[in-house]
Image (tube, rainbow, N blue to C red):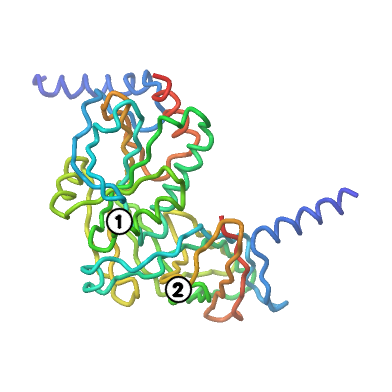
């Protein structure tokens, strides 16, 4: 009975954390957590912003995932995509005293046995030019691509 | 020993004991002083001054609406704090001052802040006016082009939230990443006064 409860709890946790919907049985990359921050649809930014090449129509969003590389070989997260955004980038927020600096990253290393934990104020997957609002309580589909492992598509809960 | 050394030594000894006496868990500003005033416009176009919120406890945060990580995290935490405070939060105001006035139109500020709470308010103004406000509060703002990103540019900025009490004095500087429980605790103290 206790085993069954634990099993059910485990399933519930997995479902809540964003179950990989297209995970190959052999993928060494395990998704331990995944969530997205709610984000509104936004109109284009002001004129000057447009001239500077950053009008940001659609608004921006962030997805946070925790990945474990259970395989014997090192891997890396090299990109992500989503129908909810025109562009998806890997970003890092760096805290420099009280100043927060955000920079894009080409890839995020996943050493064998290592855990990559994204979190607010740190690594995140940035959704740019959203195609629809990210509503709390709903889910957003995000596909992660790796240097070696097969891509993973996650249904990420929004909160 | 030179007098300057003695003063430094005394300060060193006094600081930890003063900190221990503070009832606040976040960054208490001692002694409290008047919050620097400003004239900005709300995201609905109304001119406002910081003293317009006398009688309320104000959370003053500086950010921008294309910011996907730090700014929404902060606003979501404030929404959570407000929820936890319940009826006491009626005298709490959250102001979001833009650090990206060219892209942050009033409409964008309105949509962005209201996503987190219907009472949160965006503030903007001409860059020259905003720059004086940033400086008065010690907020670092630097736009930074991002090669290879479709974002165009990001804005590096201080993520400290200032808390102004009902009497208009600056009381707390809350760093990014401060636990919600600590923020709620300190606001409860200020709202009870």
> Which residue, given by chain and number where applicable, does mark 1 sit on?
B106
Left/right of residue B73 with respect to residue A141 in the rendered view:
left
Front-most of B141 and B37?
Answer: B37
In this view, B128 is above or below B185 = below
Residue A10 x/y as whole percent: 75, 56
Residue B68 x/y as whole percent: 41, 60
**Dot label at residue B173:** none
In this view, B37 is above or below A5 = above
> Which residue, given by chain and number where applicable, does mark 2 sit on?
A88
In this view, A34 is above or below B24 = below
Quadrant of the rendered image containing residue A102:
bottom left
Crowding near the residue tagged with mark 1, few <14, some 14–19, many ≥20 C-alpha atoms within 10 Å: many
Q: Looking at the figure, which quarter contains the N terminus of chain B? A: top left
Q: Looking at the figure, which quarter contains the C terminus of chain B? A: top left
Residue B127 x/y as whole percent: 17, 55
* Residue under the point 22% across and 72% down: A52
**How far separated are the C-alphas under marks 1 and 2?**
26 Å
* Residue under the point 45% across and 26% down: B188
Front-most of B75 and B40?
Answer: B40
* Residue under the point 20% across and 22% down: B9
Residue B16 x/y as whole percent: 33, 23
Q: Chain of mark 2?
A: A
């Amino acid at each position: 009975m206790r085993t069954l409860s634990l099993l059910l709890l485990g399933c519930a946790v997995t479902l809540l954390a964003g179950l990989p919907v297209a995970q190959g049985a052999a993928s060494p990359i395990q998704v331990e957590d995944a969530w997205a921050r709610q984000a509104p649809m936004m109109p284009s930014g002001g004129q000057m912003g447009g001239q500077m090449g950053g009008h940001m129509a659609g608004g921006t969003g962030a997805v946070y995932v925790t990945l474990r590389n259970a395989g014997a070989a090192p891997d890396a997260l090299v990109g992500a995509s989503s129908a909810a955004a025109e562009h998806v980038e890997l970003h890092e927020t760096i805290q420099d005293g009280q100043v927060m600096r955000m920079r894009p990253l080409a890839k995020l290393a996943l050493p064998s046995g290592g855990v990559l934990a994204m979190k607010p104020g740190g690594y995140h997957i940035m959704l740019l030019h959203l195609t629809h609002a990210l509503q709390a309580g709903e889910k957003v589909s995000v596909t992660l691509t790796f240097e070696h492992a097969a891509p993973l598509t996650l249904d990420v809960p929004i909160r | 020993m030179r007098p300057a050394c003695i003063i430094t030594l005394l300060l060193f000894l006094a600081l930890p004991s003063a900190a221990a006496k503070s009832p606040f868990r976040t960054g208490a500003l001692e002694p409290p002083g008047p919050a620097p005033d400003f004239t900005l416009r709300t995201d609905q176009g109304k001119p406002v001054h910081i003293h317009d919120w006398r009688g309320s406890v104000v959370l003053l945060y500086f950010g921008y609406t294309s910011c996907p990580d730090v700014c929404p995290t902060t606003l979501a935490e404030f929404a959570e704090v407000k929820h936890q405070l319940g009826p006491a939060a009626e005298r709490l105001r959250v102001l979001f001052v833009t650090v990206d006035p060219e892209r942050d139109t009033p409409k964008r500020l309105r949509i962005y802040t209201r996503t987190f709470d219907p009472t949160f308010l965006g503030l903007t103004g001409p860059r020259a006016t905003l720059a004086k406000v940033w400086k008065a509060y010690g907020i670092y703002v630097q736009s930074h082009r991002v090669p290879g990103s479709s974002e165009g540019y990001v804005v590096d900025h201080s993520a400290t939230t200032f808390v102004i009490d009902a009497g208009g004095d600056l009381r707390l500087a809350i760093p990014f990443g401060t636990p919600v429980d600590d923020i709620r605790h300190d606001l409860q103290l200020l709202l009870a006064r």
